[in-house]
């Protein structure tokens, strides 16, 4: 505990330092420049007039912008996949990974209904940053698949998947990309209404889920705006199609049951056989989550400052592998208290246009329970801050530069605390520049990051320097077609978990072993893309490849320790290559109803230098949809297909492909008003068994069976 006390002291010192020097831009600030523009000035759709929620891409001058960076004209190379509040409503789920899983190049870890993180282009964990308005979620979801992301999609108004050089602004670890979740905890503008309310309620049949969320924004006078929001979600055990256990594992378990019976242990044999043949329900998969947040902001012209505090609380079951040696049900309860700060100061004419500050503090506690009794408790305190200087436009030259600081104090207590107490610190500088050269656009980005990990309990201390850079070149035709190429050299320091893990992790039913001697992971990357529209057809296509030196991965050894399979962190050269794309064709678009046909898909091949496949890489997938759109309603039917996955790592099981039939209907009951909408959905209509290959628990945690859901969103 003395170590942890010192960590808290260091944390407070760091907080003071960051408050004075190193915090960041609010990523979404470009979408709503500070000042007091009215909601009507921001709305692009007359039906949205008076509501500043629905399109954060529209700034107060009516310009469309991407909010995941500090530059209005910045192109994120292969593009930014965006889900606005309406798309979030149509894809609502308890974890952000499940919300985004339908986007091209995006899958999910799907560890359980209570824990699912995005997988971008086959990358997950440390290689994908999850941001809240441009600052880290400051939880431990990146360290293990069983840890929930402390973001409730119910309170999000926009989610962006960021790629390209601009991702370097948010961390060298974001090799796969970054997820930026934008909310309104800190108000972004002074509404022209006396109050503004957003609300959503929903339910489904597969897990008997019930959810509700809402927010209130009120102008307080004198340039002040107040905000409160909250959400609640509860679900029971998940209904599944067919057997819970995958065929290969089911055969093994039934063989073990036969052996137990021959040995005379009939009770254990019957119990194992019952578990192996379980159908229809995923045991111990219920969840309950609630959140509450409050914020205030002050606006003076185009400058502003604001702060928010909030709590995220969730409890969820962790389905366990039958025969895995864990006799009692495992569950996780976590709570995060978080404080956020955002400020922007307009500097006037000169080299700089404005300075942006963003910082957050988190106090996070996470307990893994065994049969209702506390097993291991993780106590994590962290801070992250950024200070960004936005340059004034100089003809064809735009840019920004800044610094970032991160501190985390990690303590695990319990008989199965598999990581020793440790502290992680990172200090970084970054720059991003864009130039127009005739018909070409050139982007250059660079980042230097110094990080350190120390654990006084075991006398361990190491530091790392990571240098990363990227360049992108884009050409746009007069017809609106855009072609581009980028190249990058990125470096990532090993995390504390990769270095220090050494013990049983009961929630994942594994014995994890780190490597104190891990080196900095480095990669060369290349990407070419094309996107645009030609008449009624729109498309986006990207090819990418990365070549890794000292790639860090977790490998099954085949050994057993304390009754658990051993997984080691190792390093080796590796390659990732893939393609992702989407296209739509509006073949009827000349009347009150438009009809579109769309297709999207992705494919990834990831392997070590010797040709050994890397584990948990998503298979080839395609989704085809037919959608009709009108003013009062939209209707959609789609077929989602995933291929068999037979390219597996040693000791990794294969997964069978699947085809899902889904449908949805959105009704806007008040004609001309898109701010009240009811969504009806039917997913997996044919009730087929489907398993995500990217999931650590794919052998015994299938996706939901047939599910009917409905939700209502209202803004006024």
Image (cartoon, rainbow, N blue to C red):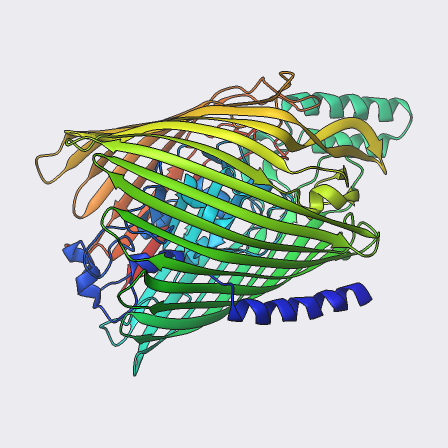
Q: Which residue is drawn at 69% across and 37% down?
A: 519
Image position, residue 482 (x, y; %): 25, 31
Q: Would residue 468 be found to the left or right of residue 463 on screen?
A: left
Q: Which of 226 and 285 is in front in this view?
A: 226
Q: Would residue 72 be found to the left or right of residue 659 on screen?
A: left
As drawn, the residue found furthest toward the front would be: 350
48 vs 558: above or below: below
Image position, residue 474 (x, y; %): 30, 33
Image position, residue 275 (x, y; %): 71, 33
Q: Nearer the viewer, residue 542 or 201?
A: 542
As drawn, the residue found furthest toward the right would be: 264
441 vs 618: above or below: below
Q: Would residue 260 be found to the left or right of residue 33 on screen?
A: right
Q: Which residue is drawn at 39% across and 59% down?
A: 389
Q: Residue at x 34, y 64 (%)?
A: 354
Tell how many labels: 0
Locate residue 424: give its quadrant: bottom right
Quarter of the image with the N terminus is bottom right
* Residue 568 visible to an observer of this rendering: yes
Locate residue 412: give its quadrant: bottom right
Quarter of the image with the C terminus is bottom left
* Residue 102 visible to an observer of this rendering: no
23 vs 690: above or below: below
Q: Nearer the viewer, residue 322 or 356?
A: 356
Image position, residue 173 (x, y; %): 56, 43
């Amino acid at each position: 505990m003395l170590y942890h006390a010192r960590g808290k002291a260091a944390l407070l010192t760091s907080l003071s330092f960051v408050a004075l020097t190193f915090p960041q831009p609010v990523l979404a600030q470009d979408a709503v420049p500070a000042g007091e523009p009215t909601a009507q000035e921001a709305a692009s759709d007359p039906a949205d007039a008076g509501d500043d929620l629905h399109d954060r891409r529209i700034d107060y001058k009516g310009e469309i912008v991407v909010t995941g960076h500090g530059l209005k004209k910045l192109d994120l190379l292969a593009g930014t996949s965006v889900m606005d509040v309406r798309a979030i409503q149509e894809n609502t789920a308890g974890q952000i990974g499940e919300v985004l899983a339908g986007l091209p190049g995006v899958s999910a870890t799907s560890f359980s209904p209570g824990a699912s993180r995005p997988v971008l282009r086959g990358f997950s964990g440390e290689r994908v940053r999850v941001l809240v308005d441009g600052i880290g979620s400051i939880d431990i979801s990146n360290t293990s698949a069983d840890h929930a992301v402390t973001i409730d999609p119910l309170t999000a108004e926009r989610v962006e998947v960021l790629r390209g050089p601009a991702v370097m602004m948010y961390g060298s670890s974001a090799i796969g990309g970054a997820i930026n979740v934008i909310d309104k905890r800190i108000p972004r503008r002074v509404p022209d209404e006396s109050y503004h309310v957003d609300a959503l309620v929903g339910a489904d049949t597969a897990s008997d889920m019930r959810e509700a969320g809402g927010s209130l924004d009120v102008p307080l006078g004198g340039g002040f705006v107040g905000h409160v929001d909250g959400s609640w979600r509860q679900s029971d055990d998940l209904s599944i199609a067919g057997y819970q256990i995958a065929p290969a594992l089911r055969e093994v378990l039934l063989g073990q049951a036969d052996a137990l019976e021959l040995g005379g242990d009939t009770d254990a044999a019957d119990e194992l056989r019952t578990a192996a043949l379980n159908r229809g329900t995923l045991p111990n998969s219920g969840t309950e989550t609630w959140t509450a947040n409050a914020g205030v902001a002050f606006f003076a012209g185009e400058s502003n400052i604001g702060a928010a505090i909030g709590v995220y609380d969730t409890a969820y079951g962790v389905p366990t592998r039958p025969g895995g040696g864990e006799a009692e049900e495992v569950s996780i309860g976590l709570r995060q208290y978080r404080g956020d700060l955002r400020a922007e100061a307009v500097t006037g004419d000169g080299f700089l246009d404005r300075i942006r500050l963003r910082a957050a503090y988190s106090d996070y506690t996470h307990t893994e329970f065994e049969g209702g009794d506390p097993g291991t408790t993780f106590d994590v305190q962290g801070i992250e801050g950024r200070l960004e200087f936005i340059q004034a436009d100089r003809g064809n030259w735009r840019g920004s530069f800044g610094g970032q600081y991160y501190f985390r104090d990690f303590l695990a207590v319990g008989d199965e605390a598999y990581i020793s107490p440790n502290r992680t610190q990172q200090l970084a500088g970054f720059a991003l520049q864009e130039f127009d050269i005739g018909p070409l656009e050139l982007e250059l980005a660079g980042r230097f990051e110094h990080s350190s990990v120390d654990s006084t309990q075991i006398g361990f201390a190491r530091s790392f320097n990571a240098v990363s850079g990227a360049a992108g070149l884009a050409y746009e035709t007069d017809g609106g077609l855009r072609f581009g190429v980028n190249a990058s050299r990125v470096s990532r320091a090993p995390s504390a978990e990769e270095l220090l893990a050494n013990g049983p992790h009961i929630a994942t039913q594994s014995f994890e072993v780190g490597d104190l001697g891990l080196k900095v992971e480095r990669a060369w990357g290349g990407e070419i893309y094309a996107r645009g529209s030609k008449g009624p057809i729109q498309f986006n296509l990207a090819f990418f490849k990365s070549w890794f030196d000292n790639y860090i991965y977790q490998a099954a050894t085949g050994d057993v320790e304390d009754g658990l399979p051993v997984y080691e962190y190792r390093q080796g050269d590796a390659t990732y290559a893939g393609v992702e794309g989407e296209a739509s064709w509006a073949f009827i678009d000349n009347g009150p109803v438009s009809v579109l046909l769309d297709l999207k898909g992705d494919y990834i091949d990831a392997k070590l230098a010797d040709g050994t496949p890397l584990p948990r890489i998503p298979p080839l997938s395609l989704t085809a949809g037919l959608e009709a759109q009108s003013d009062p309603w939209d209707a959609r039917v789609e077929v989602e297909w995933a291929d068999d996955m037979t390219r597996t790592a040693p000791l990794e099981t294969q997964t069978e492909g699947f085809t899902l039939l889904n449908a949805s209907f959105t009704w806007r009951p008040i004609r001309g008003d898109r701010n009240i909408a009811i969504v009806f959905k039917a997913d997996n209509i044919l009730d087929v068994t489907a398993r995500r290959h990217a999931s650590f628990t794919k052998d015994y945690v299938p996706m939901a069976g047939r599910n009917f859901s409905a939700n209502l969103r209202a803004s006024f």
